[in-house]
Image (cartoon, rainbow, N blue to C red):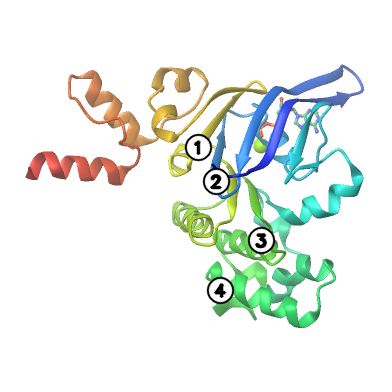
């Protein structure tokens, strides 16, 4: 069995609001992320996804319960630095994450702040820009990059700190479909080939079906958790939770309701096409 990397135990988080007292955004969350896993977190707006993701590198601390990263309690200040290094965060808006006027300088920012020797930083930056496919843009100005490329730059900057885990909070929500697809391919490559643990918060179900495991949040609680084939066959429940099913799943579900016996592991358009081809060509 893989090691547990992040563990949330009975995690509850209350936002303090001066006028109303407080708002419980997370309640009784028990969740582990294993080393090397690709976990997707989905849920409707306001279900607590960002609040949960921010607990994974100690940006937020539990109101009660606990979160540990590589065995370190996020509530202890002495662990903060190491936890931030082990868990890199990438946010929704690529423009807010740019800090330099040159791509390679931008990617170096986090690693430089670790106090690494300049030679080591340079080596790491060259490597991480290559990993995300931005080597040809090393000398460019970041604001000239596309949205998808900016997100890849944010990822390169985080990777240069050699984290164990990437936590991405809706990183594709401001990208066009081509940019989204490319970013997903980068994440899958980092996870499968570079063994980076990935936690992806997304409202695109098409992205979540590509994960090893999916956690569905609803009103600050875990409503469902399991591999995509288990989660995405709970069609009625997902719709009740306000989630939009991926097109391939809607078609497969519709066909099943009309008496066709389709296998349950049809999750993507490619799965559906392969199935149709099999049926038609025999
Ligand atoms: P999601 O990312 O799933 O959309 P969030 O984690 O951002 O959800 O928010 C969960 C709930 O907490 C929402 O009801 C939201 O209004 C509330 N919330 C989020 N951030 C704050 C904040 N800074 N202060 C008060 N309430 C907040
Ligand atoms: Mg959010």
Q: Is residue 162 visible?
A: yes
Asked whether, in this view, residue 207 is left or right of residue 95, the answer is: left
| In the displayed structure image, the side of residue 146 where residue 20 appears, left or right | right
Measure the C-alpha gap from mark 3 to mark 2: 21 Å
Real-space Cα separation, disc 4 to disc 1, in angstroms: 28 Å
Residue 37 in percent (x, y) is at: 55, 46
Which image quarter holds the N terminus? top right
Give the distance between the C-alpha atoms of the residues marked 3 and 1, in whole angstroms: 24 Å
User: In the image, which is nearer the foreground, mark 3 or mark 4?
Assistant: 4
Q: Quadrant of residue 181?
A: bottom left
Is the C terminus in the top left, top right, bottom left or bottom right quadrant? top left
CB contact under 8 Å: marks 4 and 2: no
Q: In the figure, residue 146 lies in which quadrant?
A: bottom right
Where does the image place residue 48, in percent across and percent down from the top left?
68, 29
Q: Is residue 100 visible?
A: no
Dot 4 alpha-carbon crowd within 10 angstroms: few under 14, some 14 to 19, many 20 or more: some
């Amino acid at each position: 069995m893989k090691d547990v990397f992040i563990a949330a135990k009975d995690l509850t988080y209350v936002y303090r609001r001066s006028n109303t007292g407080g708002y419980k955004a997370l309640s009784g969350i028990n969740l582990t992320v294993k080393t090397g896993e690709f976990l997707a977190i989905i849920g409707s707006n306001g279900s607590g996804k960002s609040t949960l993701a921010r607990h994974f590198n100690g940006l937020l601390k539990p109101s009660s319960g606990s979160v540990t990263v590589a065995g370190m309690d996020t509530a202890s200040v002495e662990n903060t630095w190491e936890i931030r290094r082990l868990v890199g965060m990438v946010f929704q808006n690529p423009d807010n994450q740019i800090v330099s006027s040159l791509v390679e300088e931008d990617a170096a920012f986090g690693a430089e702040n670790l106090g690494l020797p300049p030679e080591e930083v340079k080596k790491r930056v060259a490597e991480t820009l290559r990993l995300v496919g931005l080597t040809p843009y090393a000398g460019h100005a970041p604001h000239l990059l596309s949205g998808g490329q900016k997100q890849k730059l944010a990822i390169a900057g985080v990777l240069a700190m050699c984290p164990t885990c990437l936590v991405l909070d809706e990183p594709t929500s401001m990208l066009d479909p081509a940019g989204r697809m490319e970013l997903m391919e980068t994440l899958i490559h980092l996870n499968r080939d570079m063994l980076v643990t990935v936690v992806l918060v997304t409202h695109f179900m098409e992205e979540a079906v590509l994960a090893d495991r999916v956690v569905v949040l609803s009103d600050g609680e875990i409503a469902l958790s399991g591999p995509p084939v288990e989660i995405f066959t709970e069609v009625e429940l997902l719709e009740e939770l306000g989630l939009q099913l991926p097109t391939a799943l809607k078609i497969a579900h519709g066909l099943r309701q009309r008496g066709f016996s389709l296998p349950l592991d049809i999750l993507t358009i490619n799965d559906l096409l392969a199935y149709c081809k099999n049926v038609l060509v025999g």
